[in-house]
Amino acid sequence: MKQLAENKKIVLFDGVCNLCNSAIQLIIKHDKNDLFRFASLQSETGRKLLMERGLDPEKLESVILIDPGVAYYRKSTAALEIAKHLSGGYSFLYLFIHLPEFLRDPVYNLIGHYRYRWFGKKDQCMIPTPELQSKFLD
């Protein structure tokens, strides 16, 4: 496992989900402050980070954002915490954080439940290009 970069937020994502991979590409493109690092939920690194936080790697259908020294976030809260740091107007999505999770998470869960049907699934996790390799922990 690569050394976890200090002061970097770690995004754990479903590496075989087309929607998730597109979201990671969007994050990379709009991460002007080089704040994020990535690992798939299926990777050894991702599974280890989940278990360290008491999360079952077999039962997750959510993006996880690990904010070192602070906490970790799941589902809509993770997505909004990520958006807060992105360029291109995406930070305005963070305004939705003021809605309670019980209103936000059902929408997130619906998309998460149907993500493979609606957006498709890869046979294996995305392999980052050499230029992006340093952003991935696995």
Image: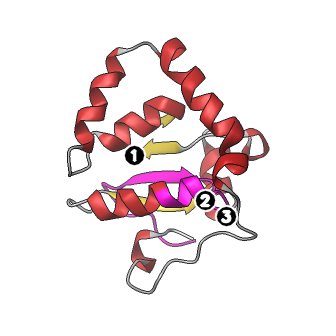
Residue reaching furthest bottom? 130
Which residue is disc 2 drawn over? 18
| The N terminus, quarter of image | bottom right
In the rendered view, would you say 49 is above or below 133? Answer: above
Say which label, 3 or 1, has the lower sequence index. Answer: 3
Distance CA(mark 2)–CA(mark 1): 27 Å
CB under 8 Å between discs 3 and 1 = no
**Res. 94 visible in picture:** yes
Residue 43 quadrant: bottom right
The local crowd at label 1, few if under 14, some if 14 to 19, many if 20 or more residues have their Cα within 10 Å, is: some
Which residue is disc 1 drawn over? 68
Name the residue rendered at 53%, 34% in the picture. Answer: 74
Name the residue rendered at 38%, 84% in the picture. Answer: 131
Q: Is residue 96 left or right of residue 117?
A: left
| The C terminus, quarter of image | bottom right
Q: Nearer the viewer, mark 3 or mark 1?
A: 3
Name the residue rendered at 44%, 30% in the picture. Answer: 77
Amino acid carrying mark 1 in the image: Pro
Residue 84 spot, x, y in % from top left: 27, 39
In the rendered view, would you say 50 is above or below 124? Answer: above
Amino acid carrying mark 2 in the image: Asn
Distance CA(mark 3)–CA(mark 1): 19 Å
